[in-house]
Amino acid sequence: MKLMNRLKPIIATLATATIGSIAVSETVLRVIPHADLKNLDPIWTTAYISRNHGYMIYDTLFSMDENFTPQPQMVDSYSSSDDGMEWTFTLRDGLTFHDGSPVTSEDVIASLERWGKRDGMGQQLFSNLASLEAQDDQTFVLKLASPFGLVLEALGKISSNVPFIMPKEVAATDPFEQITDYTGSGPFVFQEDEWVPGSQVVYTKFEGYVPRSEPVSAASGGKIAGVDKVIWTYFPDQTTAVNALMAGEVDYFERPSNDLMAILETNPDVVVEVNDPLGNIGFARFNHLLPPFDDVDVRRAAILAMNQPDYLAAAFGDEQFWMTCFSVYPCGTPFASEIASEGIKTGSVEDAKEALAKTGYDGTPVVIMQPTDIPALSVFSLVTAEKLRDAGFTVEVQAMDWATLTSRRASREPVSEGGWNMFHTWWIGADVMNPMAIAFSGDPDAGWFGWPTDPELEEARKAFAVAETTEEKAAQAHRAQERLWTIAASGQLGQFFTPVAYRNSVKGLIKSPVEFYWNITIE
């Protein structure tokens, strides 16, 4: 004991001398994303992997909390006129971009204008807009030309397309072209020189980010980077990815295949849980511009073959992870209804075969893009191919990765020149809760991939945006659903729930339909 007492001053001196010379170990969160990140512009595409990338590096004016109520994020204060036709917003102090320049009203306006040309709700907002002008560097004013009851909901929408705030010069990019400058305004910095498409994406903590003081609730509250670095490592093979998680080589797996859940659940160091109570809605999307799906009767015939349980059981197995839903809006949400859905509830391959025979279908091949690295969508593609063949369609399945599909689906060219006839996807429930979703657009020029044309659908969507009561909104939501079924815009494949999996050393995971990587620490 006497010896230890004599050594204490020496030990303290040595510790003080060496702390400054020993590098503090950086904390790293290693993630397996649900897809490869190839397209870096979350306004140009609705792909969720690009949206997740957007949330890493950009901030938003408002954010949705766990009750889907918009809360201020970059905005410090705001007010509206009594009639709701004029809104004034003031930005928080200390907002900076990753290059050190301040975030100004001009940056906000340019970002919103670009977003408003691609996003469904943004398009509706801007169609009702009289002006959007900067009052000073931190204050801007939005004036409506006609009533629009979803101003804050539009500015704070939680998923694709999210109105992320970019520098004015970047936001000046044509919205139908991808940006090439990734200077952000959010809690992490994208390390472009370490980005390896098909392999790795690296983000580092932005020391200049000033988080809000409120507690986290879904996308809202303080975005505190709890780790120094986040690395996304892409695994095209699910089994390899699961083994990496179980071995502790990675910390978090966004979308493990449901058929591998039983293996993950045997590992005491891995947590498996459903993080999104609304789940996802499966879509089979037609290209309305090209034969054979430029014919509404051919699209209707195809939809008749799409028996939801066949898709859901094949892709997800255990019924605890899925349920049939014959509404275009997620079941369990305010506007869910089975209006005009009789055909999809009772259809069969035989019904589809009979309906197709009446169309005069000439055997034009249906080219289905199959994303082999997304297990559920790969299965959906194969189930559709089999059903359509049995119904009398000529079908060609073209295998590719999801990143390639999300680029190719933007093409309106003939199939022989890189076009397509059909692809499968999902929307998170939060994205398609009402007809404002870009997935439900009937405008072929500004709408989502597939490009249906239906003025009556657009009228219903516009009427929903200005409706003042819940009853009026419900009436327009149901009117929009009736039009979507009438024009056979897409096939609905049911509602499903995909668990996430992570090491139990991961703490602070946010409950949300979107994967967020702030607030997380590693113990």
Image: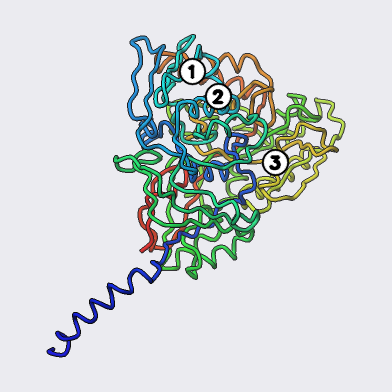
User: Residue 227 vs residue 107: left or right?
Assistant: left
Residue at label 1? 132
Badge 1 element: strand
Q: Farthest residue toward the left?
A: 2
Q: Position of residue 383 (x, y in %)?
A: 69, 46
Instruction: Tell me the tag on residue 25.
Output: none
Q: Disc 1 or 3, which lies upstream in sequence?
A: 1
Residue 174 visible (yes or no): yes
Quick one: 389 or 133, which is closer to the camera?
A: 133
Q: Eyeballing the image, is 440 above or below 392?
A: above
In front: 277, or 318? 277
Kindly indicate whether the residue at mark 1 contacts the one at mark 2 (C-beta within 8 angstroms). yes
- The mark nearer the N terminus, 2 or 1, is 2
The residue identified by callout 3 is 407
Q: Tell me which numbered mark, 2 or 3, is placed earlier along the sequence.
A: 2
Q: Residue at x 46, y 12 (%)?
A: 144
Residue highlighted by disc 2: 113
